[in-house]
Image (spheres, helix red, strand yellow):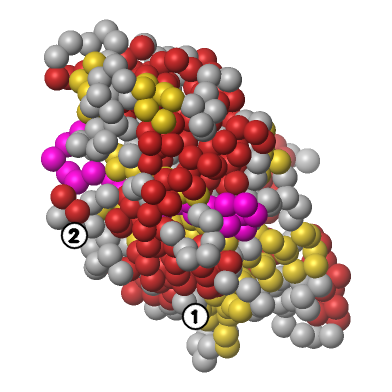
Amino acid sequence: MNKPIRTISIFCLLLFLALMVNATYLQYWKAGKLNDDPRNRRELVASYSRERGAILVGRNNPVAKSVESDDEYKYQRTYPKPMEYAPITGWFSYYSSTGIERTENDVLSGEDSRLFVTKLVDLLSNDPPQGGNVLLTVDPKAQDAAYDGLKALGANVQGAVVALEPATGKVLAMTSLPTYDPNKLASHDLQEVTQDFKRLNEDPTQPLLNRAIQTRLPPGSTFKVVTAAAAIDKGLYTADDLVPGGSTYQLPLTHGPTGLIDNEGRSCGANGQKIPFTQAMEQSCNTSFAQIAEQVGAEDMVKTAEGFGFNSHYFDDLTPQAESVFPTELDDAQLGQTGFGQFDVSATPLQMAMVAAGLANGGTVMRPYLVDSELSADFDVLDQTDPQELSRAVSSTTASEVTKLMVSTVDNGTASPAAIPGISVAGKTGTAQTGTDRSPYAWFISFAPADNPQVAVAVMIQNADIPRSEIAGGLLGGPIAKAVMEAVIK
């Protein structure tokens, strides 16, 4: 073979090898990324041409489903109660997917390996492929009560409600305001989707944010139940004991008004006087709980807070979850502030619902979960979620003692708006200062019935068009918590 022919042959061989390498790279290494690329119209048409499974609540009531459409995509994703369930379902569109639509995508799309037989049968029978279904733990009546209660506070409210079943960790309700319409983001008009997504993403009120799990704020006086639990578990007090009181208290290491704690006029005894523990909780005495936290000590305060879930990740059914924080490096002044939920203490509504649920469950905190079961297209169970213990926060005796304090707070104190006739309710209010000119955050936690708990609730109101003087956890959050508890119990 002469030199020119040999050169051309080698060149052609190199081109052939380059094509083989490129094909292998695209089909093996790059395939997943190309499939997930929102610009891949082929993948878009394919995903919209499959009948995606439903997201269900209650007795198989769909809150997300696919219906036939008359365009090239064959199926349209629809959300029957869009605003109420959007923080849970999320949306499914060519942009991306969020919420349950994202975390349960393999089941809903039919790509889950457990649906292989179903896909094979569909293929052999020439039926269009179908995705599996996902059943949630949500109680529709509790969800309605939570959503309607928040909405009743006004058009511009920002807040969240979470309800849990204490014995299992099931999420019975989860709502967040402001919210959005996922039907618009699931539209087949891609230009309209782009515009709506941009509008929502740039909205300063952050309607795409699920405040139930992604907003972390000072929990204020609702955290006093954790301080009480730490003190009782350490053996310092019982619910029937006297604790430090006082109209004011100067934090250690401080001088003057900067470190002076007061109770905003509530009845907490004179300085140097001791008062009943029930009174300290009923009146939400900052001066008492600052001193109690100092007596407990930083190490045991951290231990108790982390027992309830602070400083940890525990929820995977929706992402991302903001971890609640209890600071681990504290001087004595900072420790006193943590006793009533200030300084650097911050919590999500889900976290504070877990605090209430842990006390309701005898001191055992269950891992919260939202997906009850994954189902085939024919509603055969693929997987059922089993309740799982997260931690033992405090002893059952301690939980019982704190429950006494919380019941007394509903019967005689600041948490009275959550009272339900004929049912014993445990509750605690919270109003957390923001450190700015903004209005404080209003919190409320509760569970009922106190002697046989079926539901634990946390309400957080971040902002509302309400005069500053009228913002209080009991006044705003109490009626919402009451409505949610009644929806579950009755």
Position of the C terminus by quadrant = bottom right
Q: Nearer the viewer, residue 9 or 386?
A: 386
| The magenta stretch spans residue 380 | no
Q: Which mark is residue 465?
A: 2
Numbered disc total: 2
Location of mark 1 (residue): 80
Residue lying at 24% horizontally and 68% vertically, measured from the top left? 155
Q: Report helix, strand or loop for mark 2.
A: loop
- Amino acid, disc 2: Asp
Is residue 79 among the parts visible in the rendering?
yes
- Residue 131 vs residue 170, the one in the foreground: 170
> Where is residue 366 drawn, in percent x and y?
65, 44
Q: How crowded is mark 1: few (under 14 residues within 10 Å), some or many (20 or more)?
A: some
Q: Earlier in the sequence, mark 2 or mark 1?
A: 1
| Residue 105 in picture, x, y percent from top left | 63, 61
Location of residue 269 with respect to 381 vertically, above or below: above
Say which residue appears at 14% left-offset and 14% top-offset: 256
Q: Distance between the residues labelled 2 and 1?
A: 29 Å
Residue 358 higher or lower than 272, as above or below: below
Residue at x-position 63% and y-position 73% = 58
Residues rendered magenta in the picture: 435-460
